[in-house]
Structures are given as structure tokens and as C-alpha cells.
Image (cartoon, grey):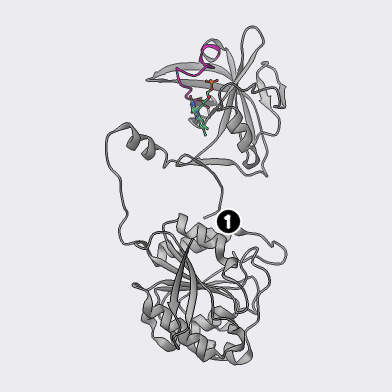
Amino acid sequence: MAARQFTGFDGSPLLAQESGSRHAPTVLLLPDLGASGEAWASVAAALSDAGRNSIVLEWRRGADTFGTDALVSDLHAVLHQLSSRPVIIANGSAAYIAAVALGEGGPDLASGLALVETIPGGGSTSAASADLAERAAAAIAETGCPILLLAHGEDFFPAARETQHIECSAAAPSPEVPDRRDAFHACLIDFLERRAPRTATEYVAGSDPRTLRDALGTFATGVTIVTATAPDGRHIGLTANSFTSVSLEPPLLLVCPARSAGSMPVLEKAEFFAVNVLHIGQQGVSNLFAAKGEDRFAETEFELWDRGVPILANALASFECRKYAEYDGGDHVILVGEVERVRYAPQRDPLLYFRGKYRRLHFA
Ligand SMILES: Cc1cc2nc3c(=O)[nH]c(=O)nc-3n(C[C@H](O)[C@H](O)[C@H](O)COP(=O)(O)O)c2cc1C
């Protein structure tokens, strides 16, 4: 985040925090009146990760004591100082101010508007005064830009529900489900991608190993621990994301361990192996089974089923397999297993891996 300063309608400074590239399309985030821009920090981070330039504006000091006109004028002033038309995302009373500013200032000031009742983890929201709500109701009908309404109840911005060009979503956190941060971010990103797409996708091209690795890293995967037992009873296990389901009849899966892996001599000879899919809380297990020089099973809870290979306690899913085939895969081996026994936890989220980093699921 970098500090940025705008000038209000009367020349007074308005502070903002900016993140993401200035060349990326801008999203202007407006905190509720009386709230700090900090409430938008995690959303700003998620949006800049998604390739947006996020600007979190702080209203002028004591904004809730200024009249609507002053705040609308400040917003007009900021919009004129931006080099492109942003999507505005605002919550609580600020959502009403934003609707007034766009409805009364002309539709060309912004390329989209998201009206948010509550930010997950952002505290309670102020209610708009009757005057402001009435003025916003008239203004919203004039805003030609796409609008997203994120509200859990019927009380927030009722006029918005009646307009034609509005999309409603229930991703706003409700009192029953207070923290739905990921779903909330996903909903905003989805709106931005559809309604304010980036002008051109930037590609990186090449045939060198780095480019190939990075391109392959765009395929998001889960994370597994492949385990087996040596003839002397020693257990081996390594982290692998090169896991794929292959066939249901017969039930086959595959995983690709590197020829250079320390586990390879055991895997090559093993008649049985297991694939343990990790859940979101098992990033430490993934790191442990990828690190050199650690006793991987010293602190790891596991059990043995019919074939004597380690089945990790708490895994999201475990597949006990008989080796079905082994193919040449260049500097890796394509190990195909026939699944003999399986167990999975239907209510847990997976640990994901994407572009060389762990991720967690959010819903589209
Ligand atoms: C997320 C992640 C995915 C990985 N996927 C694979 C894989 O599919 N195949 C592989 O051979 N190594 C993979 N690795 C690297 C191995 O886990 C790592 O080299 C490990 O130290 C191998 O252990 P070993 O040499 O004791 O067999 C992965 C590592 C991480 C962190």
C-alpha cells in the first residue's frame, strides 16, 4: 500500500491508500462514514492480487458531520483527478453517497458501482439518514453504469432492488454467517471481470524452462502426500501435486514422482502406495514432506490399512493403491495406481497450489 493524496472540492487534502499497478484498471473503495479505510484493507489486497489498482479513500475528517453535498462534491473531485473511470465499491452510508454522486454527476464518472451493506470483518454499518436514502433512491435510477448490490437483508438500499440494471448477490455477510470473506472477494472480482474487464490480457511467451514452469503453474491443483513402505518397514512419503484421476473402471489414478527424489528407490520397488490429499489446515504437512533432512514421520500421525502403507490421519482423502503400471515420464516417472480402498472427508476444504503458492478455495 502506498499513500496517495487527492484534493477535495474546497482544496483540502483527502488521503488514500493505493495498491496494485497504476496501469491496471482502478477500483475506488469508499469506507462507511465514520469508519476508517482499514475496513477495506483485505478487499484492496485481494483486488490488487487480481490485477486491479485499488484506491481506498479516507473521507475528510468528521465526514459524518458534513452534509451530503460536501461529500458528493469531494467524490466528484476525486473522480475527476483519476486518469480513468473506476469501479466504485462503497459500504454503508457511503454507498448512498456514491449513488448520489454518480446519479447526479453523470453516468460517465464511473464504470461500475458495487453497493455493499457490510464488509466481512469490517464492523457494523451506519444507516443512511432518511434524506440521504431518498436522494439516493432518485439518483440510482439515473446511473447508467452496471450496479452490484451486496446485501443480506431487504433494508439496505431498497431502491436499488427496483432498478433494471442491477445484479443482486447474497455474498454480503449475514449475522448468521459473519465471515464470508472469500465468497465476498470472489463476488466482487467476478463483477469486475464481467463488467469492467481489463483491456487486454498480458501474456508471457517463450520456450525456456522458466516460462514452461510458470505456464504449468497456472494450472491450479490440490496437494497430496504420496506414501509407501520399504521392504525393511521404513516409511517414505513426499509432497506431490502431479496427481490426476485416470479411470473409474478400473479405478485408476496417477502421480509423477521425480526420478531424482530420495523416495524413488522405494516407490519403484513398492507393490503398494497411498495418495493422501491434504486439507486447508495441512500446509505444514506439505512443507514437511517437501523439506530435506527432516524425519517426516516422527511427528506425523498415520495409520496402516490392509497394505501397510502410511495413511495420514486427518487427510482430506486417502487412496490406498496397488501399483498398476509405471511409465517413463522424462525426468519423472508416471506411477499409475489401482485404488483398493478410499476414505474422504466430505465437509473439509482442500489445500490448493497455484503459481508456486498455497491457496485456498473461494467459490465462483
Ligand atoms: C506443492 C508441492 C508439490 C510438489 N509436487 C511434486 C511432484 O508432483 N513430484 C515430485 O517429484 N516432487 C514434487 N514436489 C517436490 C517434493 O516434494 C520434494 O522434492 C521432496 O523433497 C521430495 O522428497 P524425497 O526426495 O525425500 O523423495 C512438490 C513440492 C511441493 C511443495
x and y percentages locating residue 6 in the rendered image: 43, 76
In the depicted structure, whether residue 198 falls above or below residue 257: below
Judge by depth and name the residue closer to the eye, 73 or 139.
73
In percent of the image, x 59 and y 76: which residue is there? 32
The kind of residue tagged 1 is Asp
Judge by depth and name the residue closer to the eye, 282 or 349.
282
For disc 1, the neighbor class at 10 Å (few under 14, some 14 to 19, many from 20) is: some
Q: Is residue 353 shown left or right of residue 312?
A: left
Residue 295 visible in image: yes
Q: Is residue 53 shown left or right of residue 179?
A: left
x and y percentages locating residue 72 in the rendered image: 49, 86
Count of labels in the image = 1
Q: Of helix, strand and loop, which mostly describes the magenta segment?
A: loop
In percent of the image, x 67 and y 10: which residue is there? 233
Q: Is residue 17 shown left or right of residue 308?
A: left
x and y percentages locating residue 129 in the rendered image: 63, 88
| Residue on which disc 1 sits | 182
- Specify whether tag 1 is near ligand 1 (CB below 8 Å): no
In the depicted structure, whether residue 153 falls above or below residue 238: below
Residue 170 visible in image: no
- Residue lying furthest top in this view? 232
x and y percentages locating residue 117 in the rendered image: 61, 73
In the depicted structure, whether residue 319 falls above or below residue 173: above
Q: Which secondary structure lies at badge 1? A: helix
In the image, the segment drawn in magenta is 255-266
Residue 335 magenta-drawn?
no
In percent of the image, x 68 and y 72: which residue is there? 124
In the depicted structure, whether residue 172 falls above or below residue 290: below
